[in-house]
Amino acid sequence: MMMTVNALATQTPTTLDDADVKVLLLENIHADGRDFLRGKGYDVQTNAGALGEDELIEAIQGVHLLGIRSTTYITPRVLDAAPDLIAIGAFCIGTNQIDLEATTQRGIAVFNAPYSNTRSVVELAIAEIISLARRLHEKSTDMHRGVWNKSAAGSHEVRGRTLGIVGYGNIGSQLSVVAEALGFKVIFFDIDDKLALGNAKRCSTLEELLAEADVVTLHVDGRPGNAGLFGDEQMRLMKPRALFLNLSRGIAVDTSALRAHLESGHIAGAALDVFPVEPKRQGDPFESELRGIPNVILTPHVGGSTEEAQQDIGRFVASKLRSYAAFGSTSLSVNFPEMNLPADDTRCRLALVHENAPGVLARINGLLGEHDVNIEAQSLSTRGPLGYVVTDVADAVPSEVLTELADLPETVRLRLLS
């Protein structure tokens, strides 16, 4: 059972059995995630598409756990309409679609899947690089039109070429290893210090990378500073007839500039899996100024959309939501202090999210001691402005203790797990 007090929402404490925990999963989250949560007794509702802000505000009423992918945006207005919400699962790598400051202020834990679809994105990047180098997309289109165009003109091997990776995180670094095995010379640029893998060489500036790379591929995150990262200036610095890929964030690339450089022939081909504006639902129309340009591959944000990756993500994030809801565990949380807590059905567990201020733990323990509540185990962790203390006690906690804990000025959210 779970009792939640949200200090910001000033809601009445409510004790929940598993069957009363409401879950909303959006954007075609894999059935394994849904089935896992239903198997724990939770009431799980699903929606195939993303929801706009007003739609989400209506749908999120009474929801305790929310699962999204990359196209549903979590704003302060949405969170204000969801006093029962305790955790959000991003069933993807990025969390830039979630206002993390607002979730943290409201004591809502956020989880994601930082590694689960890395291989899928890497394989798509390799496939698209080879396809662009061999102009396979154009040749396939000609064949479907009934045109036999057996020519080697413009087709090249990737062996011996230089691959420039912009962003050397989980995906960029794994792409580096696979590409080197194919015979690429690999160079990379990242604003953070990163250890080069294999024979990859770090570039000190983006300009250095652009001058040397035969293929440039972006693997950056969605932080605001990456908006407009790659525009006309950067494309002018690329080698003539180089190839360009973006499988990271649509906001990073000026597509108007890319079109101009493709049409001039300066860039020989491009592959994009992400776009500044993307349809919210399956089957919605897609508009882009890059449509119809030769040797350009456009895919609908499917870099991580393999059955294997989505299955892994579904299970992984669903299990994180369950562990937090049932046991208070915050392992691999994006915004909470990390605490890996085992299940314990023999004791009552108090999970208190609080402002990271001096003396909070002493006040909590003082209250428990005044009411003769015996502490059997306790863990405390902090992260930035937030503190998280989990206390296991032997017996049921009196209601007046819960009230006093909830009324502490530093309390953000209090949950009783038993």
Image (tube, grey):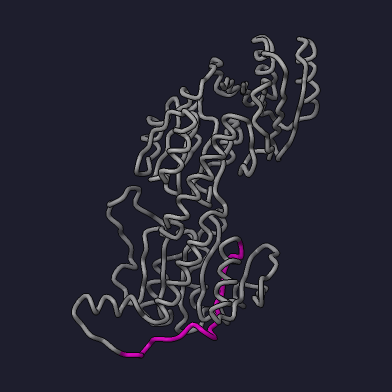
Q: Give the percent coordinates (x, y) of residue 134.
A: 39, 82
Q: Nearer the viewer, residue 177 or 10?
A: 177
Q: Nearer the viewer, residue 242 or 176?
A: 176
Q: Nearer the viewer, residue 32 or 79?
A: 32
Using the image, determine if residue 255 lies above or below residue 410.
below
Q: Is residue 94 visible from the viewing direction of this image?
A: yes
Q: Is residue 77 visible from the viewing direction of this image?
A: no
Indicate the quadrant where residue 286 lies: bottom left
Residue at 66%, 15% (x, y): give it: 402
What range is drawn magenta here? 151-169
Using the image, determine if residue 203 lies above or below residue 319.
below
Q: Main secondary structure of the magenta part?
A: loop
Q: Give the percent coordinates (x, y) of residue 143.
A: 24, 79
Q: Nearer the viewer, residue 49 or 252?
A: 49
Q: Is residue 76 magenta?
A: no
| Quadrant (top left/top right/bottom left/bottom right) for the N terminus | top right
